[in-house]
Image (cartoon, helix red, strand yellow):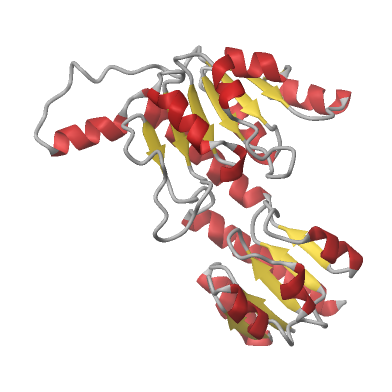
Amino acid sequence: MKILIVSPVSTHAVEQLRKNHDVICAFNAPNEEIEDRIVDRDVLIFRSGPDISAEVMRRAPSLSLLIRAGSGIDNLDLSYVREHGIVLRRIEQPGARAVAELGFALMLGLARRIRTADQTLRQGKWAKHQLTGYLLADKTLGIYGCGNIGSQIGEMGAAWGMQVIGCVENVSEERAHALAERNIRLTNVEELLSASDFLSLNLPLSDSTRNLIGKQAFDLMKPSAFLINLARGGIVDEHALLTALKDNRIAGAGLDVHEAEGDGKISPLADLENVILTPHIGAGTVDTQYQIGEEILEIVKESSKS
């Protein structure tokens, strides 16, 4: 099979694919290069970042398989995929645990002011008695979107002694029961926003979720609350978040995803002490990427047999 890989994946997986297939790697290439490289390809492997538009896919008449090495598909033209009968395989589970653990790292970092503690100590300041923080135990953790990632964060929070509430769209009785067994109680948006000490966003980006968390949401949140965004940058109105933080409407924020991502892009929140910013590294663990690579190999193997 002729395979194009446009996002970094496990080196081991690439090496194994090359043993039996024609593989081109164009990691983080601009769309013009992707359009040139995809022309004769059967398979496209990608992560978040590249714009897999109809124009890109139209250039490849033999394209029959898309492998999303992760979960989000907001950078993919799904209408084109459906219209042309292209098979889409998403590798969701390995990254979910990694993203959930990063969410916990951000919560702990904010609660214990680790960024400030590190910076002041590096400057020779012993701020032991000024850097008081908060426990996670007995706090309320709100999960906005209880899919693979959100439910894992909720389960981890419950194990940590947190009270976990969640909110999902169109939930079934069966799904509510399954979440309850993981100690996640479903509620409405208003309670989720007003009761959460830590609010974790785990929603896909769509027209209905773009700028979902803005001024109205921040007005409902506790002044002591922390916001964690592990989903997509467009879900949070970052200028409204900046205002809320400056006005002490909420206590802090940890963002792994941003409205503008990539080299040279500086977040409007970059100067704030009570914010932790990471460059979309949620699934970026050695273990996770190896597991994703193994699933890529299996998917390609199955497809090449059919």
Give the vertical position of 149 relative to 251 (above or below): below
Residue sitting at 58 percent across and 76 percent down? 14
Give the vertical position of 249 relative to 2 (above or below): above
Residue sitting at 75 percent across and 84 percent down? 1
Residue sitting at 54 percent across and 74 percent down? 29
The picture quadrant where one finds residue 110 is top left
Front residue of 82 and 32: 32
Q: Position of residue 85 (x, y in %)?
A: 90, 68
Residue 232 visible within the image: no
Front residue of 246 and 87: 246
Residue 151 visible within the image: yes
Give the vertical position of 260 relative to 114 (above or below): below
Residue sitting at 71 percent across and 65 percent down? 67
Q: Total label count?
A: 0
The picture quadrant where one finds residue 146 is top right
Q: Position of residue 22 (x, y in %)?
A: 66, 87
Front residue of 174 and 24: 24
Q: Position of residue 109 (x, y in %)?
A: 37, 31
| Residue 111 left/right relative to 18 | left
Instruction: Residue lying at the far left in this picture: please name it.
Output: 124
The quarter in which the C terminus is drawn is: bottom right
Q: Position of residue 286 (x, y in %)?
A: 48, 57
Front residue of 207 and 102: 207
The picture quadrant where one finds residue 42 is bottom right
| Residue 202 left/right relative to 173 | left
